[in-house]
Image: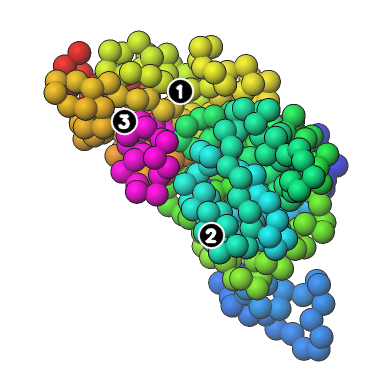
Amino acid sequence: MSLSEQQAAGLSAETMVVAAGRPPRERDQPVNPPLVLSSTYYGTGPLGPGDRGYGRYSNPTWDPFEEALGQLEGADLQGLLYASGLAAVSSALSLIPSGGVLVMPNHSYSGTLVMAAELAQKGFIELRTVDIADTGAVKAAIAPGGPDARAAAMLWLESPTNPMLGIADIPALTEAAHASGAIVVTDNTFSTPLVQQPLALGSDVVLHSVTKYLAGHSDVVLGALVTSNADIRSALLHHRTIHGAIAGPFEAWLALRGLRTLALRVEKSQESAKVLAERLGTHPGVESIRFPGLRTDPGHERAAAQMKGFGSIICIQVAPAGGLDGAAAADKVVEAVNLWLPATSLGGVESLIERRRRHTAEPATVPENLVRLSTGIENVEDLWADLEQALDTLGG
Ligand SMILES: *Cc1c(COP(=O)(O)O)cnc(C)c1O
């Protein structure tokens, strides 16, 4: 819209979130893109690729966000917005040819896992789930030995995984996948393009639940895909148009408004998460902790090599206490907070806390006493005081 690719290439990401996706600098143009509420557009004669046509094909309110996200992920092409993160997952999975093999982390986001499992159950794809941190096992699943073994058509990556915070070696795995002819999709929801750039690490497609950090205010549900491959993009665009999982223009407008503060929000919440993780790690109510920013975390070195920062999601397992098992103790902590919000989702300005196994769809391999913390932008001492008093209700 306003920034040429050349201009964009020279600007830092924290500038881009503010500067990208603006209307042209012409006298009396608004500085913010307008919200366009129209299901159709004037036109006669044959529809060409440049035509807007109909509200399911395109909407001017999608463009600035899609353009900004494409530039932030370092893509050559505009991104694609969807009605939700899972709508984007559905579109990405449609790239697998009939009966093709999908290799996916066994601790991907639960909705993604359910969708893949249902496709496999119907015989549309073959699903191989793997521990994504185990590079050898993932490579073996992508290209198993033996004459009858079929190589993967798609490698799905999520790193860090939700909620187990497993870290994939993205460059090594994308290289192995490409060597076998598989395309690689990376769910970058936890990291945002400011923290991790999967296209630069070798992925073909990047996925976001825009609902989370990108929009950042827990007031919209949206998803997005980004790629630099024109054939992949046109297949995805066709899928979005025909399957109809399009973004509402008001949500798209809110997402761009949220994106403007992404750099500030990510910086603040990452800093606070590091402080909180260090303190949580020594609290007697915490049995174990996963946060890639801790030196002791099994994913620390890998995360340090491919991320700028470590995100702001922390997972703890709550220790059994006072006759309560771990799950009951975890519930007690979540019920005892006053500032943290006991609610699902993540990536908003407000800090959220949840025992994940309250969802029946969460894999049984996620421990019952696991509590996921999404660190927001509140004062870190206020956040700590609230967590500490909640953990202290277990009676050290
Ligand atoms: C929330 C989430 C999704 C699904 O996105 P929705 O916007 O809820 O449909 C996908 N992947 C990850 C990592 C998520 O956290």
SS at circle 1? strand
What span is in magenta?
353-376
Q: Mark 1 and mark 2 in contact (Cβ < 8 Å)?
A: no
The disc label shown at residue 121, or none: 2
Amino acid type of disc 3?
Asn
Q: Secondary structure at mark 3?
A: loop
Which mark is first along the chain, 2 or 3?
Answer: 2
C-alpha span from label 2 to label 1: 32 Å
Judge from the rendering whether residue 336 lies leftward or rightward of residue 248; answer left or right: left
2 vs 1, front mark:
2
Q: Residue at x 82, y 86 (%)?
A: 46
Queried whether the magenta region covers residue 281, the answer comes back as no
Residue at 77% of width from left, 57% of height from top? 232
What amino acid is at disc 2?
Answer: Gln
Q: Is mark 3 within 8 Å of ligand 1?
A: no
* Mark 2 C-beta closer than 8 Å to ligand 1: no
Residue under label 3: 369
Q: Residues within 10 Å of mark 2 (few under 14, many from 20)?
A: few
In front: 44, or 164?
A: 164
Picture coordinates of residue 7, whole percent (x, y):
82, 41
